[in-house]
Image: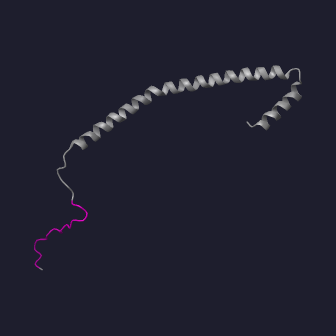
């Protein structure tokens, strides 16, 4: 909310409630707003902690899987080397072709 919106809301509240009840209404609103923020922060904290442990286990499992797949590939010696792109590869000879 911008400053002008807050001013409009306060003016409307002043008109509706009157100058005698406005300070108490603002205090009540502040308390309610504070409680709502506490509940919201508590909910966010609980939500985060509830998903923190499963996500940690998921990351560990993914890392173990990655290590299990990639480590043998790194340790495997190169047995067959594919021909380089610049090397000429001769076509296979066809039997019975006497040309």
State which quadrant residue 23 falls in.
top right
* Residue at x 50%, y 24% (from the top left corner): 49
Q: Is residue 92 magenta?
A: yes
User: Is 58 situated left or right of 1 in this image?
Assistant: left
Judge by depth and name the residue closer to the eye, 43 or 26. Answer: 26
Image quadrant where one finds the N terminus: top right
In the rendered image, residue 75, in percent from the top left (x then y), is placed at 22, 42
User: Is 37 situated left or right of 44 in this image?
Assistant: right
Judge by depth and name the residue closer to the eye, 78 or 51. Answer: 78
* Residue at x 77%, y 20% (from the top left corner): 28
User: Is 2 situated left or right of 90 in this image?
Assistant: right
* Residue at x 81%, y 32% (from the top left corner): 9
* Residue at x 40%, y 33% (from the top left corner): 59
In the rendered image, residue 54, in percent from the top left (x then y), is placed at 43, 28
In the rendered image, residue 93, in percent from the top left (x then y), is placed at 13, 70
Q: Is residue 6 magenta?
A: no
Span shown in magenta: 83-98
Q: How many marks?
A: 0
Identify the image's colour scheme: rainbow, by chain, secondary structure or one colour.
Answer: one colour
State which quadrant residue 73 falls in.
top left
Image quadrant where one finds the C terminus: bottom left
In the rendered image, residue 45, in percent from the top left (x then y), is placed at 55, 24
Q: Name the main secondary structure of what is drawn in magenta.
A: loop
Query: Residue lying farthest front?
Result: 3
Q: In the image, is residue 35 above or below residue 3?
A: above
User: Is 64 situated left or right of 19 in this image?
Assistant: left
């Amino acid at each position: 909310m911008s400053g002008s919106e807050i001013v409009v809301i306060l003016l409307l509240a002043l008109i509706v409630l009157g100058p005698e009840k406005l300070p108490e209404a603002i205090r009540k609103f502040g308390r309610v707003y504070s409680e709502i923020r506490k509940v919201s922060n508590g909910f966010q904290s609980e939500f985060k902690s509830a998903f923190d442990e499963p996500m940690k286990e998921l990351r560990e499992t993914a890392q173990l899987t990655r290590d299990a797949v990639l480590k043998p590939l790194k340790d495997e010696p190169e047995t067959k080397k594919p021909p380089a792109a610049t090397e000429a590869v001769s076509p296979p000879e066809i039997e019975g072709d006497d040309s």
